[in-house]
Amino acid sequence: MLVGLCGKTNVGKTTFFNALTLANAKIAPHPFTTIKPNEGIGFVRVKCACKEYGVNCTPRTGFCLKGERFVPVKVMDVAGLVRGAHEGRGLGNKFLDDLRRSDVNILVIDASGLTDSEGNPCQQGLYNPLEDIKIVMDEFSFWVNSILKEKWRRIIGKLIQEPTSKIDKILFQELSGLGLKKEKIKKAIDESRLTDKKPQLWSGNDLLKLSRKLVEHGKPFIIAANKSDVSQSEDNIKKIIKKGFNVVPTSSEAELALKRASSKGIIEYIPGDPDFKVLKGKLPENLLKALKTIKRTVLDKWGSTGVQKCVDKAVFEVLNYLAVFPVEDEKHLTDHEGKTLPDVYLVPKGTTAKQLAGQIHTDLQETFLFAYLVREKRKVGADYQLKHRDIIKITAARGRK
Ligand SMILES: Nc1nc2c(ncn2[C@@H]2O[C@H](COP(=O)(O)OP(=O)(O)OP(=O)(O)O)[C@@H](O)[C@H]2O)c(=O)[nH]1
Ligand SMILES: [Mg+2]
């Protein structure tokens, strides 16, 4: 699972990345600070089963804070872009190449509207942050379009050579580097109204339309309306929501400050929470002031910094994944080493009990007998489709559990 962070330059992608991973990647108030992608481990937040069962969990990876489980996911922050990136402007299209690997992308925008299309500071009202979304979607689409155009003769050639082959299958093979799923390609063709038109007759315009749809469906996005702490952001965020975009207001700067203060033991803060608690009695005046500002301009206003919410939504809503707790001992919720609720698996919706067994161990899938839902206290078969937060025990033949 790889979550990509993309967007116009100077909008706060790296700040968002640092806030998620507590890395120290370079942040600066000017365009094109990030050149090479930063990769690290962030977390999605899941209500842990430990609280419900009154046990202390011992996570093998990630951690649990007061019954909130933080499950690792890979995060990648790439170079920022400007208009014309697909033709090499700014830092060019290398970032598009990097994003080929991501499963879901968080498109970070500067909701304050105080940076222009080139990422330079500008006065309020001169730039509409909705453009930040359009720039990214356009550049992605133009890039896919250029790949499609480059390969088009070959694609048509294949279609002529193998008349029984379908265009979606050939596109799937030829565009394999983009990491698009076959059904998404089919959907893109349908929505471009090209299903009944012979590919040999598709025009340049048709290909561009298809490229846009491939981007829309192939690489799912959620928008982080960043810099929500800046007063100018509020109206812009309302406008973006009104347009129907899937958007989460975020302040990556506030999240980073809270995480750092928490790691130093200054405050108690659970990422995603609407509040924090000051732990150290006497804080320097400037620190206290900064924390109060975060409380007033971000937490009280938006309900949280939004950073955690955005990643959770990207994984659980946009990508449609769910989290499950496999255990080997249904009474104690432990594995064979006695670790309590040691693992949380992130799997796509529709994953069956037997497929989960395969993710745990290939042996377990091959010798799968049945599964047991701990909460519901009932046996289920191989085809049982997992639900979010299932606690599940898998029983296999030959004594392997
Ligand atoms: N007010 C405010 N400023 C932010 C926020 N997030 C980032 N910034 C500031 O925005 C500027 C750019 O931040 P970066 O994280 O370097 O942005 P980027 O998108 O990675 O930029 P490039 O790598 O240059 O494309 C820095 O001055 C940050 O401090 C935020 O949530 N609120
Ligand atoms: Mg950066």
Image (spheres, rainbow, N blue to C red):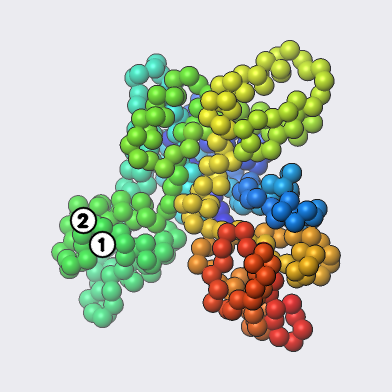
Which residue is nearer to you in this view: 53 or 116? 53
Task: Please give the residue where the numbered disc 1 appears in the rendered image.
Answer: 190
Residue 205 placement (x, y as % from top left): 19, 52
Secondary element at tag 2? helix
Residue 322 placement (x, y as % from top left): 56, 58
Residue 148 placement (x, y as % from top left): 31, 58
Q: In the rendered view of the protein, which quadrant contains the C terminus? A: bottom right
> Of all residues shown, which one is farthest toward the bottom?
398
Count of numbered marks: 2
Task: Please give the residue where the numbered disc 2 appears in the rendered image.
Answer: 206
Residue at position x 71%, y 18% from top?
Answer: 287
Residue at position x 44%, y 24% from top?
Answer: 234
Q: Amino acid at mark 1?
A: Asp
Residue at position x 51%, y 63% from top?
Answer: 349
Quick check: 58 left or right of 140?
A: right
Instruction: Answer above or below: position of 316 versus 182.
Output: above
Which residue is nearer to you in this view: 9 or 260? 260
> Of all residues shown, which one is farthest toward the top?
285
